Amino acid sequence: MDSLSFNINGGYLEGIVRGFKSGILKRTDYLNLVQCETLDDLKLHLQSTDYGNFLANEPSPLSVSVIDDKLREKLVSEFEYLRNHSVEPLSTFLDYIRYSYMIDNIVLLITGTLHQRHISELIPKCHPLGSFEQMEAIHVASTPAELYNAVLVDTPLAPYFIDCISEHDLDEMNIEIIRNTLYKAYLEDFHSFCKNIGGTTAEAMCEILAFEADRRAFIITINSFGTELSKDDRAKLYPRCGKLFPDGLSQLARADEYEQVRQVAENYGGYRTLFEGAGTNPGDKTLEDKFFEHEVKLNVNAFMQQFHFGVFYAYIKLKEQECRNIVWISECVAQRHRAKIDSYIPIF
């Protein structure tokens, strides 16, 4: 995309999203939050930030679930504002951001239905960014083929689901395979879309999406140890748009234990450091936390350049991490469990 003409359609919204980004909590805000004794104290501290009076109408005593819902509501209203004022190709780009939430919602609903939970109980737990009309019909499906024909055929996820269609009953293993197959197709499609836009958008987004693809490949491999998933089936779930493709993925496909996964990461400078500092002992950061930290770094870096769509994706992901941080601190305050209250991931 030509940076000379970017501002004609994208300049206003890029300015808006950079304004939103300046309201992301800083380290000093987190230092204030972790010193709170009650959730009402936390509410007072958040009022002095860009969150303002977003909890003003909530009666005391506050609960963590209410804070979580309100954080999500604020993020959704900001996203909807950006989406409603966008034109092509930015509007399609923003729709791609929605698709990952749609996948998570579908998996949540299928899993809940499998455990005999009523659909009316599950719908409120779904992320509003991923809601779509056909969601409530999901309980009628007992096989992936029925799920496709009854629910997904009219949604943007239909092309991603082609590889999942089978007559096998839905069970825990099948649902995880469906989730990872959908994510694989989604990431490859989104990566290709960003590449076609070209310019700085391709440069910023392809790096972020490549990391997301590789993270999924590492996690799929580690989580498959000790399960019935065969190595061939595992290899089919790896997204092929990351830095690990093709050599790293073929090595991961042959891995039998965590140490072999770590050896694959050794060959890639950016990933070696993530595995080096990760552990399961008290005080160690988990591999998941190290991945989140690296993701934050990539998303912050997206704001270093101008005239591109990557800032929209980066802002949503940074805001998502901020919501996780606030909910984590809120849980620790509510349960008076302060030992791990500092285990959040600062952004700035």
Image (cartoon, rainbow, N blue to C red):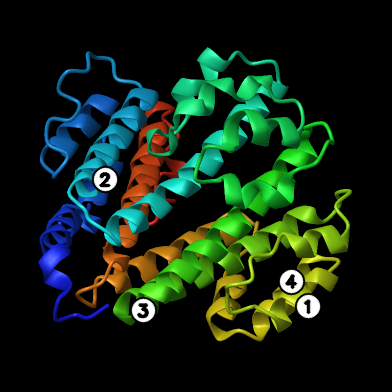
Determine whether 199 is above or below 274 in the image: below
Q: Earlier in the sequence, mark 1 or mark 4?
A: 1
Label 1 – label 3 distance at C-alpha: 31 Å
Q: Which numbered marker is on residue 251?
A: 1
Q: Which residue is mark 2?
A: 79
Q: Nearer the viewer, residue 280 or 97?
A: 97
Q: Earlier in the sequence, mark 1 or mark 3?
A: 3
Note whether residue 35 is visible: no
Q: Amino acid at mark 3?
A: Gly
- For disc 3, the neighbor class at 10 Å (few under 14, some 14 to 19, many from 20) is some
Whether the residues at callouts 2 and 1 have beta carbons within 8 Å, the answer is: no
Note whether residue 91 is visible: yes
> Which-is-in-front pick, marks 2 and 4?
2
Q: Amino acid at mark 4?
A: Val
Q: Nearer the viewer, residue 63 or 332?
A: 63
Q: Nearer the viewer, residue 306 or 64?
A: 306
Q: Secondary structure at mark 2?
A: helix
Q: Which numbered marker is on residue 271?
A: none
Assign the N terminus to one quadrant of the image.
bottom left
Q: Which residue is mark 4?
A: 261
- For disc 1, the neighbor class at 10 Å (few under 14, some 14 to 19, many from 20) is some
Where residue 22 appears, x then y in whole percent? 15, 58
Q: Amino acid at mark 1?
A: Gln
Label 4 – label 3 distance at C-alpha: 33 Å
Residue 309: quarter of image: bottom left
Q: Which residue is mark 3?
A: 198
Query: Residue at image x 28%, y 32%?
Result: 73
Whether the residues at callouts 1 and 4 have beta carbons within 8 Å, the answer is: no
Where residue 210 appears, x then y in whole percent? 52, 72
Q: Nearer the viewer, residue 3 or 297?
A: 3
Q: Is residue 335 left or right of residue 170?
A: left
Query: Residue at image x 57%, y 16%?
Result: 119
